[in-house]
Amino acid sequence: DSSDITEVENFTKASYAEPNSEYFGQLKGKNVIYISLESLQSFMIDYKLNGQEVTPFLNSLAKDSNTLYFKNLFHQTGQGKTSDAEFMMENSIYPLPQGSVFSTKAENTYQALPQLLKENGYKDTAVFHGNNKSFWNREENYKAFGYDHFFDESYYNMVDGHVLNYGLEDKPYFKESMPYLESLKQPFYTKFITLTNHFPYPLSDDKKTIAPGDTGDSSVDNYFQTARYMDEALEQFFNDLKESGLYENSVIVMYGDHYGISENHKKAMSKVMGKDINDFEEAQLQRVPLFIHAPGLEGKGGVKDTYGGQVDVRPTVEHLLGVDTKNQIQFGTDLLSKDHQQIVPFRNGDFVTPEYTQLDDKVYDNTTGEKLPSTEETKKDQELVQKKLELSDKLVYGDLLRFYDLKGFEQPKRSSFDYSKDDK
Ligand code: GP9
Ligand code: MN
């Protein structure tokens, strides 16, 4: 009931982190392009396989002075995988401990980023994805989030040789997206969801431009090849954005959605990483890359070692866009703020801080990987993590945002969206 929303409101507002004045509004009015990087883990950035970079384009972006590259960002997804990551990016709320929030809670009231930005001068919102719009119940969630357009597989040429695994391959996908993107009113808010770097990482031989790994575990070995393909697709997309003129006026936010190599591949990953992958190291591998790239950063980028999670991306981006978030209900905080607290919950209640990692109530020193005794401090951090997850779940299960009156926010009307109406 409404006393529950008050509890959530008091908690989230108490953890609000003031924007960093060096960055607040730096990207005001820019087009926003999110890209979900399927299954990309941070260890791939700058990784060399047989002396060769796997993701040379992303590596170069990570070093670009117009990129904020976060190397200590962790995914916080549960069983909803890609869709859980989308949920956090746009709501700054945790996904569910069991099942997928997209599949079960699409009828909830949300105050999601696409709709929020419409209240801040954005004129069009769109998602691009080369799979069926019903996958992960996306269509229903996107209506609740305020998306005007959803270019799903019905807008692309799903022809032999271009379709693999879950849908359209990334290169034709980005290529065919360009005319739709250019048709949007500016400034726009958009999201692209890549697919090719998805388990079990198949790719036809003529599209492989790097040799596979040599661990003998085929999904790990092939992962390098599909990641390279995705990297090339992204470079092609950046070039097309430049050619269209959109690049100069856009911010491109790219994030790894979740791990690609599960804990069932520790043996192969030990070979890849050159060290024994135990539980502690497995937790460190849950880092996913976050790039915020924009010419409008005017050289204020850099590699950031701040610890954070996917729930923190929304307030970070909003503040760069000059959007005041003080009254928003959100569980994340601005990664660029000096008030950002570096305690990163995983969805199962484990957590990571810059100093230590807690897994199953066991505490590990990040420098040595050795076990440490619990202390007052670790117990306090654990309580905070539990409180966050508990209140977030209360919010979602109780559909509590329907009781929260966010000033200036207009609830999107589901019936006003028809995702089959755009010209093909
Ligand atoms: C499917 C794509 C992959 O449309 O998002 O889903 P995943 O299995 O990674 O959640
Ligand atoms: Mn995914």
Image (spheres, rainbow, N blue to C red):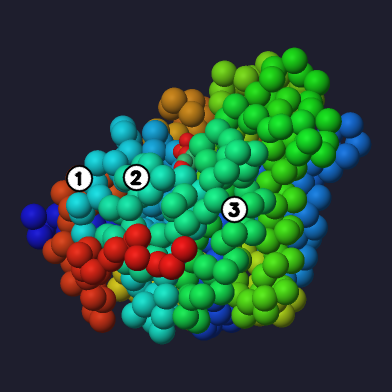
Please tell me whether residue 418 is drawn above or below residue 249 in the rendered image: above
Q: Would you say 326 lies left or right of 299 here?
A: left
Residue type marked 1: Tyr
Which percent across, then down, holds residue 98?
Answer: 31, 32
Name which residue lies at 55% across and 79% down.
30
Tell me the quadrant of the picture where the N terminus can be found. bottom left
Residue with the mark numbered 1: 397
Residue with the mark numbered 2: 134
Mark 3 vs 2: CB contact within 8 A: no
The earlier-in-sequence mark between 1 and 2 is 2
Tell me the CA gap for discs 3 and 2: 18 Å
The answer to which of 334 and 384 lies nearer the viewer is: 334
Residue type marked 3: Tyr
Which percent across, then down, holds residue 203?
Answer: 68, 33
Q: Would you say 137 lies left or right of 216 here?
A: left
Q: Is residue 151 visible?
A: yes
The answer to which of 38 and 208 lies nearer the viewer is: 208
Which percent across, then down, holds residue 174?
Answer: 62, 57
**Rendered image: mark on residue 173:** 3
Mark 1 vs 2: CB contact within 8 A: no
Q: Would you say 219 lies left or right of 149 here?
A: right
Name which residue lies at 34% across and 45% down.
134
Q: Residues within 10 Å of mark 3 (few under 14, many from 20)?
A: many
**Based on the displayed image, in which of its 4 quarters is residue 62 positioned?**
bottom right
